[in-house]
């Protein structure tokens, strides 16, 4: 279960301690290595080359190429000069042939593409605009329907009380009160439900409990069990058969979408029994170490792992701090964290700090350290006009170093905290594949360089070079010095890569991208936010409103896919922008905080402590309804992970790289500053 104790929480948003930046760990230390910054600046100024086979076989051979680059993304390399062609051709002007943007490989041969391209493009775009206007009107109708028909009287008072809570324990009490008023408690007591197999779940739970009791009796009697079939053998077989991802539908999000807090009593009892049984099997003396190791290895592969995915969204990404704080205070922060663009900065902070440090960092005073947009208009506009980017990459590298705890690599961060950091980066050329940088794919890559690359939106930050740390601790360009840019352009939520590398099949997505936030709509409710119409059994805005909303959204998506498939969409700055609309933005659980219209005005501005306090609290309110679902998932997953660590050989490679259990427990209690103080006192004595 989620930890509801206020004693284990970090400073509350409204406490005086949360507004004092002197309480931040390393508040007066920039954690900047000047040599690393100089190496990064040198790599940025170097020409980008694509080494051929001859160059790789002869690294000392200097390439006979001329470095040519545009002033910025908005200007061509060779600018047209009027009159120059006339003077060179004896006063006769020669009409220059305009270079086409798309070759025959894309458009195929034929005149119909040239003739029909723009008429068809404008016709489809016009229809998409009409659909968009109708969609806005539909959402307005649903909003008015819910405000003035669904939410009235006592239920509206209880909902307002739910939104004003400042701690998870108080929120749970308010949610239970609202569930009692709406009659949701009766739904919890009934086992039958269309979205899972209640009979199988009940039968497996009863059999598992019976076998566990028999195995516990044998444990107390120290029975050898060689002459008969031991109950623990039957229990092991049953566990291997049923401890799987979404077994019999017990992890269906619909089971948590009918109430504000909790799920079916049968599902909750099943999760508790599975967790208890796994702990018993780990501690049992009837199984050998090899049998336990084999068992929990199979369970880990079948059940999978959980990841926290933080989307991009410029300064909207600061809402991630509130979601991370809610998970951290409830002791539910997953070990696998991925971030893209603005979310990569938050993910880097979470993966390079211990729990004790994070509880001191996720407070409004953190705004003291967020100064990336502090330059005035006269400064950044001149830079944008000359280089095509509003922000300076080298300056951002210095500011980002504090969030990544210096020039840590992905492997060093994993060894420090035990968390797996993933950052999505897109190559600047349109043909190379996206990479998901982590301690497996890029162990020596410096985290702050990957964060900058993932945030390099065209026009905001120019593509940057990834840096790696060599065996001597010096930084050098990664991947031949190729440049990388914003990961949200192709893969905002890298679910396929996470499943490939770490077996992730349960994702908690914090989604704050402003351009798609409007289109996140659950007609039948979502986890912890049931439909209030017809006591949770209806549709938002009625069936007609939900049907029209779904049709319009699907139709807009269809026409965008048609334009992309026919190669009709324009490519500003040489970039295919269709993926920012057509990729997947959701996960098993999707959390989208309630934003404000004023956030769009401050989308490229540093937050004040007051604004950051609001964003943290809004993130907590959005995350609290999901914690019960996450807690049930993590109860089983952590029992399996604990068993795998306990049964892993001491000379195993993962055991060597992963922080020891004692070290992780100590780091959860003591911060880096406390450990340094203890070392100094020990040396003094």
Image: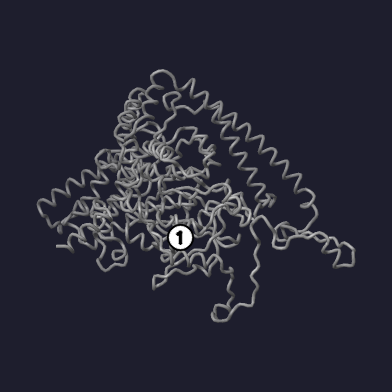
Residue 47 rendering spot, x and y as whole percentages: 59, 69
Camera-nearest residue between 540 and 100: 100
Residue 236 rendering spot, x and y as whole percentages: 25, 53
Counting every numbered tag in the picture gives: 1
Residue 123 rendering spot, x and y as whole percentages: 73, 41
- Residue 597 in the image: above or below residue 646: above
Instruction: Residue at the far left: name it.
Output: 221
Instruction: Residue at the far top: name it.
Output: 153
Camera-nearest residue between 653 and 457: 457
For the point 59% across and 79% down, the residue is 62
Residue under pointer 1: 437
- Residue 314 in the image: above or below residue 650: above
Q: Quadrant of residue 438?
A: bottom left
> Would you say 52 lies left or right of 394 here?
right
Helix, strand or loop at disc 1? strand
Q: Quadrant of the N terminus?
A: top left
Instruction: Residue at the far front: name it.
Output: 378
Is residue 172 in sight in this rendering? yes
Is residue 254 in sight in this rendering? no
């Amino acid at each position: 279960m989620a930890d509801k104790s206020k004693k284990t929480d970090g400073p509350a948003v409204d406490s005086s301690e949360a507004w004092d930046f002197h309480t931040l760990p390393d508040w007066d230390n920039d954690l900047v290595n000047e040599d690393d910054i100089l190496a990064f600046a040198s790599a940025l100024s170097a020409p980008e080359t694509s080494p051929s086979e001859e160059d790789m076989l002869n690294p000392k051979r200097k390439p006979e190429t001329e470095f040519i680059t545009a002033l910025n993304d908005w200007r061509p390399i060779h600018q047209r000069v009027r009159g120059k062609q006339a003077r060179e051709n004896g006063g006769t002007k020669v009409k220059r042939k305009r270079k086409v943007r798309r070759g025959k490989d894309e458009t195929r041969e034929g005149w119909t593409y040239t003739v029909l391209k723009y008429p068809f493009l404008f016709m489809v775009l016009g229809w998409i605009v009409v659909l968009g206007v109708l969609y806005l009107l539909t959402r307005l109708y649903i909003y008015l329907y819910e405000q003035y028909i669904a939410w009235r009287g006592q239920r509206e008072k209880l909902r307002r009380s739910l939104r004003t809570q400042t701690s998870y324990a108080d929120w749970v009490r308010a949610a239970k009160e609202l569930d009692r008023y709406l009659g949701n408690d009766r739904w919890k007591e009934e086992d039958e439900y269309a979205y899972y197999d209640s009979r199988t779940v009940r039968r497996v739970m009863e059999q598992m409990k019976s076998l566990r009791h028999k195995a516990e009796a044998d444990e107390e009697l120290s029975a050898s069990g060689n002459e008969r079939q031991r109950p623990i053998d039957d229990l092991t077989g049953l566990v291997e058969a049923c401890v799987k991802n979404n077994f019999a539908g017990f992890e269906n999000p619909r089971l948590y979408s009918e109430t504000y807090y909790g799920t079916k009593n049968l599902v909750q009892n099943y999760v508790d029994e599975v967790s208890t049984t796994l702990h018993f099997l780990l501690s049992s003396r009837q199984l050998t170490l090899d049998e336990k190791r084999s068992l929990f290895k199979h369970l880990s592969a079948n059940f999978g792992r959980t990841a926290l995915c933080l989307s991009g969204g410029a300064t909207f990404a600061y809402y991630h701090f509130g979601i991370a704080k809610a998970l951290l205070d409830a002791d539910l922060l997953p070990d696998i964290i991925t971030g893209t663009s603005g979310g990569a900065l938050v993910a880097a902070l979470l993966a390079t700090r211990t729990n004790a440090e994070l509880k001191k960092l996720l407070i409004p005073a953190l705004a003291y350290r967020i100064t990336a947009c502090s330059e005035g208009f006269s400064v950044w506009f001149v830079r944008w006009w000359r280089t095509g980017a509003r922000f300076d990459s080298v300056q951002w590298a210095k500011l980002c170093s504090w969030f990544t705890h210096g020039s840590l690599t992905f492997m060093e961060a994993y060894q420090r905290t035990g968390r797996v950091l993933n950052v999505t980066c897109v190559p600047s050329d349109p043909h190379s594949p996206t990479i998901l940088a982590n301690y497996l794919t890029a162990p020596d890559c410096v985290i702050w360089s990957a964060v900058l690359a993932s945030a390099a939106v065209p026009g905001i930050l120019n593509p940057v070079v990834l840096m790696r740390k060599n065996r001597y601790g010096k930084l050098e360009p990664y991947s031949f010095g190729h440049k990388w840019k914003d990961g949200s352009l192709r893969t905002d939520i890298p679910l396929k890569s996470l499943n490939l590398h770490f077996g992730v099949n349960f994702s908690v997505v914090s989604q704050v991208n402003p351009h798609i936030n409007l289109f996140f709509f659950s007609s039948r409710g979502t986890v912890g936010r049931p439909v209030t119409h017809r006591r949770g059994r209806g549709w938002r805005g009625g069936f007609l409103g939900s049907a029209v909303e779904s049709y319009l959204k699907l139709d807009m998506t269809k026409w965008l896919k048609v334009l992309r498939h026919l190669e009709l969409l324009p490519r500003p700055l040489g970039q295919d922008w269709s993926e920012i609309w057509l990729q997947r933005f959701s996960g098993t659980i999707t959390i989208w905080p309630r934003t404000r219209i004023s956030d769009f005005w401050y989308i490229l501005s540093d937050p004040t402590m007051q604004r950051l306090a609001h964003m943290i609290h809004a993130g907590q309110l959005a995350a609290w309804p999901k914690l019960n679902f996450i807690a049930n998932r993590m109860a089983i997953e952590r029992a399996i992970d604990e068993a795998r660590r306990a049964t892993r050989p001491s000379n195993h490679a993962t055991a060597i790289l992963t922080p020891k259990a004692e070290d992780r427990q100590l780091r959860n209690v003591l911060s880096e500053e406390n450990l340094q103080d203890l070392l100094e006192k020990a040396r003094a004595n």
